[in-house]
């Protein structure tokens, strides 16, 4: 307890909301200042293309990471209750089971918000899903914007390992791209997920060539942004590897690897949900 010249102080009340969807925060009697921290959800990775030998087959793009937003309020400027939303993530792009078919897009995330009024609203935008692998590209999803932007997803390639998810300073990370297959029938591994520079945590590793699964991005237990999922490996004579899921909170999923006709392509990894934290000071 604080026993400074200002007299004894009540400890703060910390409300942590982790269930995706809408909710309500209650403004306590005697509260003076309110701190809000939000992380938007991460975009999910896309699935890779399934195609014929002798053609380019790109893996799915990695999803984009959700942003982190912070804001301080006078409690007197807020209502007796305020609406909150914990952002939910979309599904990863489904594996392709039909020959000569492009991959499916990854689902986009949902923003996390505090307060329903325009004057007092704080928003942490979500990341978007990766683009499905085609014969020409597999683009990564865009990052969410906020006080601390998330990071974009990695793009696929047919001449090298899938692109890694972008790193972030405090927002959530992007997912790695799924590995592609060149027209010369050379398959490539998936890209690694991005990492938050301010945290000592591990991103999801990229899946190995020949259909290795992408690693899951590490989740952090102190309401911080998570690490990106790795992309699945491409496979010229078998199924593509699935992308890894993004770490809680807000990190993006990895893209799925491309495959040869007759074998399913890799599915995209799911992005992680967001979070809302509200601290009431007295």
Image (cartoon, rainbow, N blue to C red):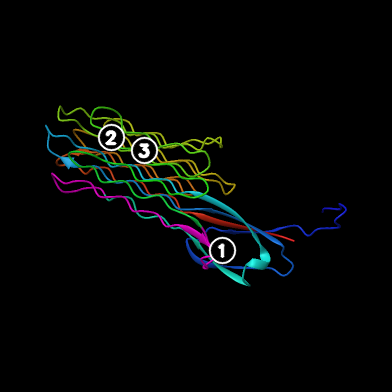
Return the disc, 1 or 3, that comes first in the chain's sequence.
1
> Label 2 to label 3, Cα distance in Å?
9 Å
Q: Residues within 10 Å of mark 3 (few under 14, many from 20)?
A: many
- From the image, tell me which residue sits under label 2: 179
- Tell me if residue 273 comes above or below residue 155 in the rendering: below
Q: With 8 as the anchor, is 194 left or right in this view?
A: left
Label the magenta part by its dominant secondary structure: loop
- The residue segment tinted magenta is 95-122
Q: With 55 as the anchor, is 241 left or right in this view?
A: right
Residue 281 location (% of width, % of height): 71, 59
Q: Residue at x 47, y 53 (%)?
A: 40
Describe the element under mark 1 as helix, strand or loop.
Answer: loop
Residue 35 location (% of width, % of height): 64, 56
Q: Quadrant of residue 187?
A: top left
**Residue 120 highlighted magenta (yes or no):** yes
- From the image, tell me which residue sits under label 3: 176
**Relative to the observer, which residue lies in front, 42 or 222?**
42
Q: Residues within 10 Å of mark 1 (few under 14, many from 20)?
A: some
- From the image, tell me which residue sits under label 1: 120
Return the disc, 1 or 2, that comes first in the chain's sequence.
1
Q: Residue at x 18, y 42 (%)?
A: 50
């Amino acid at each position: 307890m604080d026993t400074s010249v200002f007299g004894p102080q009540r400890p703060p009340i910390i409300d942590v909301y982790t269930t995706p969807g809408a909710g309500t925060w209650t403004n306590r009697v005697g509260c003076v200042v309110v701190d809000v921290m939000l992380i938007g959800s991460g975009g999910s990775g896309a699935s890779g293309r399934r195609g014929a030998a002798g053609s380019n087959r790109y893996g799915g793009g990695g999803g984009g990471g959700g942003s982190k937003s912070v804001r301080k309020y006078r409690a007197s400027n807020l209502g007796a209750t305020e609406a909150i939303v914990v952002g939910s993530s979309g599904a990863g792009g489904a594996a392709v089971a039909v020959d000569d078919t492009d991959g499916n897009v990854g689902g986009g995330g949902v923003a996390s918000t505090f307060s329903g009024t325009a004057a007092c609203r704080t928003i942490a935008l979500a990341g978007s899903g990766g683009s499905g692998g085609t014969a020409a590209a597999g683009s990564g999803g865009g990052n969410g914007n906020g006080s601390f932007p998330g990071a974009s997803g990695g793009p696929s390639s047919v001449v090298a390992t899938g692109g890694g998810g972008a790193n972030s300073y405090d927002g959530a990370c992007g997912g790695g791209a799924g590995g592609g297959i060149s027209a010369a029938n050379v398959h490539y591994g998936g890209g690694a997920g991005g990492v938050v520079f301010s945290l000592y945590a591990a991103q999801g590793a990229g899946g190995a060539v020949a259909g290795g699964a992408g690693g899951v991005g590490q989740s952090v237990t102190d309401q911080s942004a998570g690490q990106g999922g790795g992309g699945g490996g491409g496979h010229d004579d078998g199924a593509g590897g699935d992308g890894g899921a993004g770490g809680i909170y807000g990190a993006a999923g990895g893209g799925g690897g491309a495959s040869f006709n007759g074998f399913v392509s890799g599915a995209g990894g799911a992005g992680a949900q967001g979070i809302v934290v509200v601290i009431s000071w007295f």
